[in-house]
Image (cartoon, grey):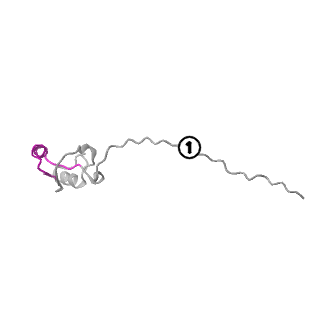
Amino acid sequence: MSETLEPMTQPQGGTATIERTDIREAVEPGDAERFSHYVKKEKILESALSGEPVIALCGKVWIPNRDPQRFPVCPACKEILDAAFGPEDGGE
C-alpha cells in the first residue's frame, strides 16, 4: 500500500517596516532631573551679568543658562510660592 503524504504547510508570514517619526529635542546629561525654579528676575539679570550663581526658593544654587520653558516647575518652589502668595491658578 502506498500512502500519499501531503506536504506540510508552513504558516505564511512576512515582515514589514514600521517607520516611527519621533521629534526629539537635544537633551543634555541630567536634563531628566531638572526643573524650572523660582528666582527673582533681578537676581537672574545680575547672574547673567556677573556669572554668579542664584539661589531658588527651594534652596537650589546654580547659574541659570537654560531655557526654563523646557522644564517642569520645581514642586518645592511652587509649594513655597503658593504658601506665600496663594495658588497661582486661583484654586483653593
Give the residue pinned by disc 1: 16
In the rendered image of this protein, does residue 89 appear above or below residue 75?
Answer: above
The residue lying at 31 percent from left, 47 percent from top is 27
Q: Quadrant of residue 80?
A: bottom left
- Total count of labels: 1
Q: Could you say where residue 92 lies in the image, as x and y percent from the top left?
A: 25, 50
> What span is colored magenta in the figure?
36-56
Q: Report whether 44 appears left or right of 35.
A: left
**Where is residue 55 drawn, in percent x and y?**
14, 53
Q: Residues within 10 Å of mark 1 (few under 14, many from 20)?
A: few
Residue 43 falls within the magenta-colored stretch: yes
- Residue extending farthest to the right is 1
For residue 45, side relative to residue 19 (left or right): left
Instruction: Give percent across and percent down for residue 76.
Output: 22, 55
Q: Can you say whether 2 is above or below 69 in the image?
A: below
Amino acid marked by disc 1 = Ala
As helix, strand or loop, the secondary structure at mark 1 comes to loop
Residue at x 88%, y 57% (from the top left corner)? 2
Residue 36 or 11: which is nearer the viewer?
A: 11
Residue at 18%, 47% (x, y): give it. 64
